[in-house]
Amino acid sequence: MTVLFPALRDASTAPALRFGDRALSYRQLASVAGALAERIAGETRIAVWATPTIETSVAVVAALLAGVAAVPVNPKIGESELAHIVRDSAPSVVLAEPGAELPGPLADLPRIDVAAAAPPEATQPPPPPFEPGDGTPALIVYTSGTTGPPKGVVLPRRALAHTLDALQDAWRWTADDVLVHALPLFHVHGLILGVLGPLRRGGSVHHLGRFSTDAVTRELSGDGTMLFGVPTMYHRLAAAAGHDPALAKALAAARLLVSGSAALPLTDHERITAASGRRVIERYGMTETLMNTSVRADGPDAVGTVGVPLPGVGIRLVDEAGRTIETSDDETVGEIQVRGPNLFTEYLNRPDATAAAFDGAWFRTGDMAIRDTSGNYRIVGRKATDLIKSGGYKIGAGEIENALLAHPGVAEAAVTGIPDEDLGERIVAWVVPESGPDAGPPPSGEELADHVARQLAPHKRPRTVHFLDALPRNDMGKVMKRELHA
């Protein structure tokens, strides 16, 4: 039996959570979460209206203390998707911050308002409840459904503990670290890594509520030691740091800058390093696997990669026939398969989908990657949307996107493939030109295609270039490529 949060049992007065001007120490968090855990003990599943608030954090911690599976719900969710999640997961109660207006399917459930007012420090928390076995479901996180309704990924307690302990090793994460972020709390990155991670280490988290470069500057200039973000956030930091000495100094003072949920363009890596002298490290994970690889905090530079396998995680590349790829070079592309204690248990109510997702003990990620000679993995994209087979070549969309972003006239870029009678698939680029007073005239499609051909190889040049005002992105900053074609 794994104790997920030893610091809660110690009930010290060290800071645990801070959201804006609201904060809880470990003793206070143990008191409010422990009291809520007693109220929900015996429930099978609960829904959590996962706003970026201290109440969401208290609700999830209480569910974990009570051994009740929590279903975090995106507060921006659409009606049909919400109806599916509530029907599929069948929560018996919903936890929400006081005053929050809940939409139909959740409003029909019994509701508990989460009390997160800090009790006096002298108050002794109730004794922690007995924690269940490591295989007990901890969270049910719904994936975005690209080919059907979202699937509920059942994450056991062992997966949470293993991933957070593996990141402790890779990132040298300690109780002295103060994590700064502004990520949503309904998914793995913001909730598991960004809230439960600090709590497992005995450190603290400062959630910004809303992301801004000023807020990052303030927190990292104070006691913040680590920053978690997605590429859109780091893109804004990269753009601002070059002319904002205070931000550059704050980034330089951070012990660790981590980007995840999508690939960080090389241009943003370079601009942040040039301004601050600090490198951004990347990691790779999925809802079903939590974290698989990372660039190590104490390791060599590996810009453009997601690093090496985390301790205890097995990773292999397989070809289209399912054969293991032994080659480590800069060219051979294969699908990533993963095994280890970080894996999910099942897709809720979907034994068919669960069985189809595995090759024996190996989970089929659907992500395509290259393994270099140092053992670092470089993601080239999703098998379904980012691997382009054109003219007999297998081409990763990511490297073309990085080449486009290296052009001074390009602010954002996405690359897809569409059917072509001659080539098999034709490379298509979707580009948002740079704008603003310092931007020059926008580039032409031919100029950008030639630029890619010079940077990479002629067969990787886009055959079609579309210009857009913005790329469609989800809440985690990932480009929704299917919407481009739609």
Image: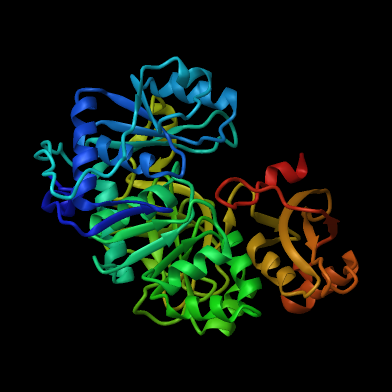
Please provide percent x and percent y for residue 197. Answer: 31, 55
- Who is closer to the viewer here, 463 or 342? 342
Location of residue 124 in the rendering, given as x and y in whole percent from the top left corner: 11, 44
Left or right: 177 in relation to 50: left
Q: Quadrant of residue 231?
A: bottom right
Describe the colour scheme in one phrase.
rainbow
The structure residue drawn at horizontal position 18% and vertical position 57%, both measured from the top left corner, is 13
314 is higher (above) or lower (below) than 238: above
Note whether 186 is above or below 207 in the view shown.
Answer: above
Relative to 394, say whether 420 is above or below: above
Q: Position of residue 163 (x, y in %)?
A: 30, 55
Q: Is residue 306 visible?
A: no
Q: Is residue 191 visible?
A: yes
Determine the residue positioned at 64% across, 72% down: 240
Quarter of the image for the N terminus: give it: top left
- Asked where in the image residue 414 lies, by quadrant, the reply is bottom right
| Residue shown at the point (43%, 45%) measured from the top left | 287
Along the viewing direction, whichever of 300 and 319 lies nearer the viewer: 300
Instruction: Point out residue 142 in the picture as x, y percentages from the top left corner.
Output: 46, 35
Is 320 drawn above or below residue 101 in the view shown? below
- Give the farthest residue toward the top: 108
Q: Is residue 295 left or right of residue 419?
A: left
